[in-house]
Each structure stands twice: as C-alpha cells, then as structure tokens.
Image (tube, helix red, strand yellow):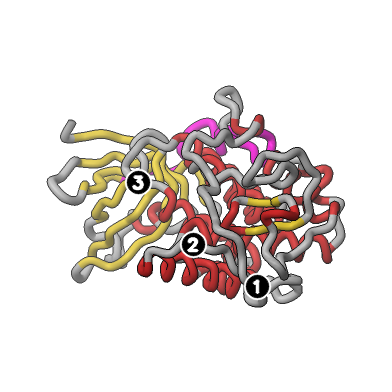
C-alpha cells in the first residue's frame, strides 16, 4: 500500500537535514509511525503547525523502505497552545507522550491512542488537576500494556485484601509475608485514590486531599519507572516534592538489584533504600486484565472522554 492515511497524535519531532523533520506519531490503526515531513522547517511552510507535539491530525503517508513520508495533514484537534500555557500541564503532557512512545510499537494500539487523545484533551480543558490526569493516564496505559497494579488483593498470592504494604517490583500491595522490611505502608485514602484513578472514578479522585494526592503520585511515578526500565526523563520535571517516599530512587535501586541478580545468577530480591527482601516472582502476566474500565465497549472507560474533538478536520495542507 504505497499510500495510506490514519488519525495520529504527534509524540515528538527531531530535525533532519536543513528543512525536514522526522515526526514520531501514535496512530489509531497502525501503532507508532515514524515519518519524514519534508520542508516543514521552512518559514513559508504551513505543515509544521499541524505536526507539533500534542497535535491530533488526519495524516496521509507514502510508504517508504525505512521511513514513510507525510504527504498531507489535516488538523483534527490542537491542544498544544492550552497545554503549553501552563507549566504543570505541559510537564504532564510531556510525560504522557513519552510514555506512549515507550509503550507502543508498530502493532495497532487503538486503545492506547484513544486513551492518550482523551488525556490530552482533559489537560487542555483543565477538567481535573494535571497531576491527577497524568497519574490516571500512566496507570491505565500500563494496565493496557499488561502491567495492571493491584491495590486491594495481594499481588503475589492473590490473598484478598485490603493490604497496605506496596512493593513496586511485585506489582502492588502484598500481604505481610511478602513485604520486605521498610516497605512503604499506604493508608486507605491513598489506596482508594489509586483505585479511583485506575477505574476513572473522578468524583472520588477530585475530592481527595493534597497529602493523599502527593503520596499516590509518588507511587505511580515509581511504578511507571520500574516497568519502563529506562525511565521517563519527563517525570523528573513533574513536581512531586511532597511525596512521602523517594520513588525514583527506590525504582532505580530495585532495578539495579534485579540486574545484579541476573548477572550473578542469584535470585532477584526486591529492595527499598532501607531494606533487604524476599525473592521476587513474576509480578504480572501479559494476559492480566486491565479491569472493567478497559472493556471492549469502552476502550478507555470513564476516565477521559474520547468523543471526536470536532465533526470535521479544521485545517488541511498537502505537501
């Protein structure tokens, strides 16, 4: 198929030559696409405004051997101006598109596409706090990828909860027998908020206290960094100064422990900055369901609206 078109969200761009850019996009039907936008950096080009991060567009591509070429772009929705006007929203959106870039490849990922579009729209409209929107997006995107956290039953044994010990590398809350010394203990309010963010219960999430939001946000950051392995650079710019745990450091220490165990052939042990631990088994399965919020009928559940931003594309340009 030399020509094809799809709806896309622009994730990032980088320069190519004197006038071109390589644009990385998450599409509705074709997964992640990297394509060349020729002449986009020229002053007279109207192409570039439609191919900036956070833009949603209907794009036509010419299929190439290594990189496709963008031949036409029609704006569906532009969230960049509203998001960039607020630093908290901008850093949250940057973390979202970086997550989508790391989680998705060439396989069709319509649910991830719809989730990202809905989250960016929510940020641009200020429907919820930027940190809440980001944390909900991260939890749900990871769940769609097969890493659904447990906030009630034990993530290791399945013993019914509630449990309060949260171990990032084991997949959520665990019963006391699996909790390493020094494991953070989360109160019911924090676990309730995490569950609400995962399921899209915004009435509950929006009513939580700032202290609870801060602790939940730290947990989400650590959980995300652990499963993405290489980490998210954008998360370093998100304000989590009031978090009750040093989440990024904990995730780094845990990752280093597992890598060291693999190198020596010894059992991997989950660790926190002040603890040793019991051997860590498989935390997740690729078949792990994402919960009722991600049913086939409602790909992203009630967390973010996925209605079409506009009935018809608002602007178009052809290369």
**Pointer 2 with pointer 1, Cβ within 8 A:** no
- The secondary structure type at the circle numbered 1 is loop
Nearest the eye: 310 or 166? 166
Outermost residue on the left side: it is 65
Nearest the eye: 275 or 62? 275
Q: Position of residue 80 (x, y in %)?
A: 53, 58
Res 209 quadrant in image: bottom right
Residue 105 image label: 3
Q: Position of residue 82 (x, y in %)?
A: 61, 59
Q: Let me know if residue 315 is in the magenta part.
A: yes
Label 2 crowd bin: few (<14), some (14–19), many (20+), radius 10 Å:
many
Q: CA distance from mark 1 to mark 3?
A: 36 Å
Which residue bears the numbered disc 1? 275
Label 3 crowd bin: few (<14), some (14–19), many (20+), radius 10 Å:
some
Q: Position of residue 284 (x, y in %)?
A: 53, 44
Nearest the eye: 39 or 54? 54
**Pointer 1 with pointer 3, Cβ within 8 A:** no
The residue depicted at 85 percent of the width and 53 percent of the height is 189
Does residue 115 appear to the left or right of 107 in the view shown? right
**Which callout, 1 or 3, points at the residue further toward the start of the chain?**
3
- Does residue 192 show up? yes
Res 178 quadrant in image: bottom right
Which contiguous range is marked in magenta?
Answer: 300-317
Q: CA distance from mark 2 to mark 3?
A: 29 Å
Disc tally is: 3
- Does residue 130 show up? no
Which residue bears the numbered disc 2? 268
Question: For the stretch drawn in magenta, what is the main secondary structure?
Answer: loop
């Amino acid at each position: 198929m030399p020509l094809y078109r799809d709806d896309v969200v622009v994730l990032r761009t980088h320069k190519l030559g004197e006038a071109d850019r390589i644009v990385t996009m998450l599409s509705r039907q074709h997964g992640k696409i990297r394509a060349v936008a020729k002449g986009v950096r020229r002053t007279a080009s109207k192409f570039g405004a439609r191919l900036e991060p956070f833009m949603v567009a209907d794009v036509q591509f010419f299929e190439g051997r290594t990189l496709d070429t963008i031949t036409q772009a029609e704006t569906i929705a532009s969230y960049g101006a509203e998001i960039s006007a607020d630093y908290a929203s901008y850093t949250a959106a940057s973390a979202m598109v970086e997550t989508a870039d790391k989680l998705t490849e060439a396989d069709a990922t319509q649910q991830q596409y719809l989730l990202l579009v809905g989250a960016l729209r929510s940020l641009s409209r200020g429907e919820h706090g930027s940190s809440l929107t980001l944390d909900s997006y991260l939890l749900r995107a990871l769940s769609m990828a097969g890493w659904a956290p447990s906030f009630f039953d034990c993530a290791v044994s399945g013993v019914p909860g509630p449990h309060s010990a949260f171990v990032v590398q084991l997949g959520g809350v665990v019963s006391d027998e699996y909790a390493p010394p020094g494991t953070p203990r989360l109160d019911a309010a924090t676990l309730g908020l995490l569950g609400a963010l995962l399921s899209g219960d915004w009435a509950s999430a929006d009513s939580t206290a700032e202290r609870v939001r801060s602790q939940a946000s730290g947990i989400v950051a650590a959980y995300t960094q652990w499963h993405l392995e290489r980490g998210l650079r954008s998360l370093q710019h998100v304000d989590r100064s009031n978090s009750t745990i040093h989440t990024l450091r904990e995730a780094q220490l845990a990752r280093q422990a597992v890598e060291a165990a693999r190198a020596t052939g010894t059992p991997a042990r989950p660790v926190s900055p002040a603890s040793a631990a019991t051997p860590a088994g498989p935390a997740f399965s690729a078949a792990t369901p994402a919960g009722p919020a991600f049913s086939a009928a409602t790909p992203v559940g009630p967390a973010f609206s996925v209605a079409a931003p506009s009935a018809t594309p608002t602007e178009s340009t052809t290369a």
